Image (cartoon, rainbow, N blue to C red):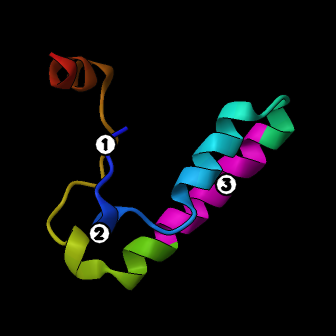
Amino acid sequence: MTRIKEYEPPGWRDLCAKLKAAKDPEEFQAIVNEINQLLTEHEKSHPEDFEGKSQRPATKKGMRANMR
């Protein structure tokens, strides 16, 4: 995972590690909710970093193209 410090909210890496280690669906969903909340708060506190940027999720096709 490439790190871009100015765009990465504090605690992001810890939550990603927790998500990877989650054992059951309820735990997984709780961590996903926490990550979404963290990202929403980060975007609201740094609107200048996200102005004009697409909020649309990446497609599998687009993800594969970026990996080449």
Looking at the rendering, the stretch of residues picked out in magenta corresponds to 28-40
Q: Could you tell me which secondary element the residue under label 1 belongs to?
A: loop
Which one is closest to the eye, mark 3 or mark 1?
A: 1
x and y percentages locating residue 33 in the rendered image: 67, 54
User: Residue 58's mark?
Assistant: none
Q: SS for tag 2? A: helix
Q: Position of residue 36 (x, y in %)?
A: 56, 58
Instruction: Look at 30% across and 28% down and name the residue there.
Output: 59
**Label 2, on which residue?**
6
Query: Taken as a whole, is the magenta stretch helix, strand or loop?
Result: helix
Quick one: label 3 or label 2, which is nearer the N terminus? 2
Image-based side of 3 in relation to 21, left or right: left
The residue wearing badge 1 is: 2
Instruction: Name the residue nearer the viewer: 55 or 32.
Output: 32
The Cα atoms of the two marked residues, 2 and 1, are separated by 12 Å
The residue furthest bottom is: 45
Label 2 packing within 10 angstroms: few (<14), some (14-19), many (20+): few
Q: Position of residue 43 (x, y in %)?
A: 38, 72
Q: Quadrant of residue 45?
A: bottom left
Q: Is residue 46 left or right of residue 53?
A: right
Label 3 sits on a secondary structure element that is helix
Q: Which residue is mark 3?
A: 33
